[in-house]
């Protein structure tokens, strides 16, 4: 067997795609620049590490289930009440280490989902296990798992594994008694064991209407969510209405 064939075989066997891709090119560079054997080996390991980190980020991003990739750089602070300093602090992810939550509430179209998505995306790029899901999809999946007697497995795999759980658009769909109880179980299982981000168009006084008008359950949920949390009231002009107005598709005149 030729030397390069043997190297390729070992790289495949030990799952070293970065070294497999770079070793020949780097060997030529090492020869020209008179690198020592240790320098050459170090460079190879660097390439392997960079590749592994990127593959890990890509996998975590795929598992997170973000509908669209949003970054904090594209968030329009000028049209929002959001404190940029606070968001930058949240992007250090100390809130995850401290098992704190983020509750984003405000009217439709002001950037709540953008902020939640951007924080979730940034978390995956820090190799933090993250799950993003809408409240309606979460309930559908929970009831499906329950009907198949796989609820415990769902809690462990989807809820327990991510360090950051993002629940988007809470408040648009009202829950029945079973759904409200399932939602409580989610919050209870993550309490002081992980972090949750929730976006909602409703103030806390309206949450009971979503949770089957169960005051005791609503109080228990809010108590756990708010205990360690950042409460962010997002106000401003709707992004969608703003874009339509700037495109000349919306004409609102005050009389």
Image (cartoon, rainbow, N blue to C red):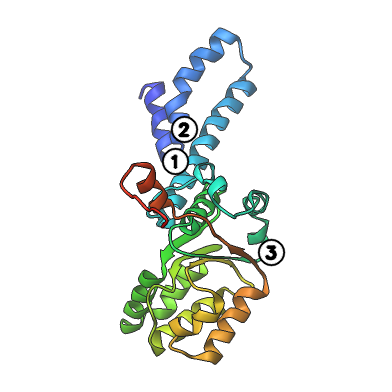
The answer to which of marks 3 and 2 sits earlier in the sequence is 2
Q: List the residue tagged with mark 3.
A: 98
Query: Mark 2 packing: few (<14 Cα in 10 Å), some, or many (20+)?
Result: some
Measure the alpha-carbon separation of dots 3 and 1. Answer: 35 Å
Quadrant position of residue 235: bottom right
Q: Residue at x 31, y 81 (%)?
A: 148
Quadrant position of residue 90: bottom right
Q: Which disc, if any, is residue 15?
A: 1
- Whole-percent x, y for residue 62 in the image: 40, 52
- Whole-percent x, y for residue 95 in the image: 66, 60
Q: Nearer the viewer, mark 3 or mark 2?
A: 3
Q: Nearer the viewer, residue 40 or 155?
A: 155
Q: Quadrant of the N terminus?
A: top left
Q: Residue at x 43, y 62 (%)?
A: 108
Instruction: Tell me the SS state at disc 1.
Output: loop
Q: Which disc, if any, is residue 18?
A: 2
């Amino acid at each position: 067997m030729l030397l390069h064939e043997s190297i390729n075989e070992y790289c495949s066997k030990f799952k070293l795609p970065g070294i497999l891709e770079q070793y020949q090119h780097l060997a030529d560079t090492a020869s020209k620049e008179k690198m020592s054997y240790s320098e050459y080996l170090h460079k190879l390991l660097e390439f392997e590490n960079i590749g592994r980190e990127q593959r890990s980020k890509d996998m975590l991003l795929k598992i997170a289930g973000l509908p669209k990739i949003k970054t904090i750089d594209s968030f329009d602070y000028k049209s929002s009440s959001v404190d940029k300093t606070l968001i930058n602090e949240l992007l250090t992810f100390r809130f995850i280490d401290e098992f704190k939550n983020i509750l984003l509430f405000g009217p439709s179209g002001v950037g709540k989902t953008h902020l939640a998505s951007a924080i979730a995306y940034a978390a995956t790029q820090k190799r933090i296990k993250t799950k993003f899901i809408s409240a309606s999809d979460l309930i559908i999946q929970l009831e499906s798992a329950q009907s198949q007697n796989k609820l415990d497995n769902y809690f462990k795999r989807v809820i327990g594994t991510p360090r950051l759980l993002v629940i988007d658009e809470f408040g648009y769909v009202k829950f029945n008694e079973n759904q409200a109880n399932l939602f409580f179980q989610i919050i209870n299982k993550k309490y002081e064991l992980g972090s949750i981000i929730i976006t909602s168009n409703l103030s806390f006084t309206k949450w009971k209407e979503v949770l089957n008008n169960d005051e005791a359950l609503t109080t228990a949920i809010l108590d756990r969510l708010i205990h360690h949390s950042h409460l962010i009231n997002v106000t401003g002009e709707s992004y969608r209405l703003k874009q339509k107005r700037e495109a000349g598709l919306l004409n609102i005149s005050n009389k």
